[in-house]
Amino acid sequence: MKIRILLVDDHAVVRSGLQLLIDAQPDMLVAGEAADGLEAVAKALELKPDVVLMDLSMPGGRDGLHTTAELMGTLPEAKVLILTMHDDDQYLFRALKAGASGYILKSSPGAELLKAIRQVHQGQAYLHPAAAKKVIQGYLQSTTPGEKEPADSYELLSEREKEILGLTAKGYTNKEMADMLAISSKTVENHKAHIMDKLGLSTRRDLMRFAIKRGLLDFED
C-alpha cells in the first residue's frame, strides 16, 4: 500500500514540484493539496493521509505551527513532517512541541526528503543533521549537571538490545536495522518492545532523551 501524502504549502509551484517528485516513487502518492492551514485541516479530516508535508509560513493567520497543533488534536494518528526554509531554533522546538514528527529544510536534496517521509510514516522521528544537534543541545542544557538515568536499567538490556537502541535513536528504520544486523524486521520490532519495557519508556521522545543522556548519539558535522 502506498504512503498517502497531503501537501500543505501556499505556493502552487512548490506543490507541483513536490508532487512530481513524490508521485514518481513506487511507494508514494499525493492524496491531496492545501494552500493554507484552514484548508489543510479540512483536507486532512477528509482524506486521512498517512503523512502531512507541512510548510510553516502560510497566509490567513494560521501558520504551520498552529495547523500542526490543531491536526494533532483532531487527527492524532497523522504524521506531520515540517518542510520549511526556516533553519531556526525557535521554529524547530515549537514545531516539535506542536507534535511534528520531523523537520527538514526545503534546501535538502530530494532523496533526503523521500527518506524523511518514509521514516516518519514508519513511526520514526526525522530531523536533518543540524536540527538533531540543536535538539540534543536543548536536552543537555535542560538537564541538571550530573543527572543520569538509572544505570541499572540500561544494564538490563542485552548487547543486541543496546545495539538496536543506539541505531533507533539515530533514526534508522526497522528495515535498515534488519538489513544491517541480518535479522528480520519483526525481530527488530520485538527487540524495540523489550527495550521500551525494560527501560520503562513509553514514547520515542523518551527513548531519545535516554539515549542522549547515555551518550549513544554521535552526530557528525
Image (cartoon, rainbow, N blue to C red):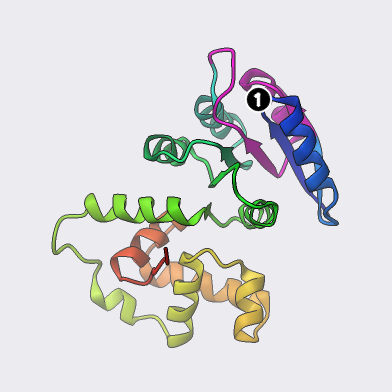
Q: Is residue 83 left or right of residue 18?
A: left
x, y percent for residue 188: 59, 75
In the picture as drawn, the residue positioned furthest to the left comes out as: 145
Mark 1 highlights which residue? 41
Taking depth in this image into account, of 185 and 37 the one nearest to the observer is 37
- Residue 202 found in image quarter: bottom left
Considering depth in this image, is 12 or 72 the residue closer to the camera? 12
Q: Is residue 84 above or below residue 127?
A: above
Report if residue 46 lies within the magenta region: yes
Q: Label 1: state its secondary structure.
A: helix
> Can you give x and y, in whole percent of width and height, for residue 139 in the image?
30, 53
Extent of the magenta region: 32-61
Q: Amino acid at mark 1?
A: Val
User: As displayed, is residue 89 above or below residue 182?
Assistant: above
Give the left or right position of residue 136, taking residue 57 as reference. left
Measured along the vertical axis of the image, is residue 134 above or below residue 219? Answer: above
Q: Does residue 3 appear in the picture of this structure? A: yes
Quadrant of the rendered structure where residue 59 is?
top right
Q: Residue at x 59, y 31 (%)?
A: 71
Judge whether residue 58 is colored magenta.
yes
**From the viewer's perspective, is residue 158 above or below residue 11?**
below
Residue 118 lies, in percent from the top left, at: 68, 56
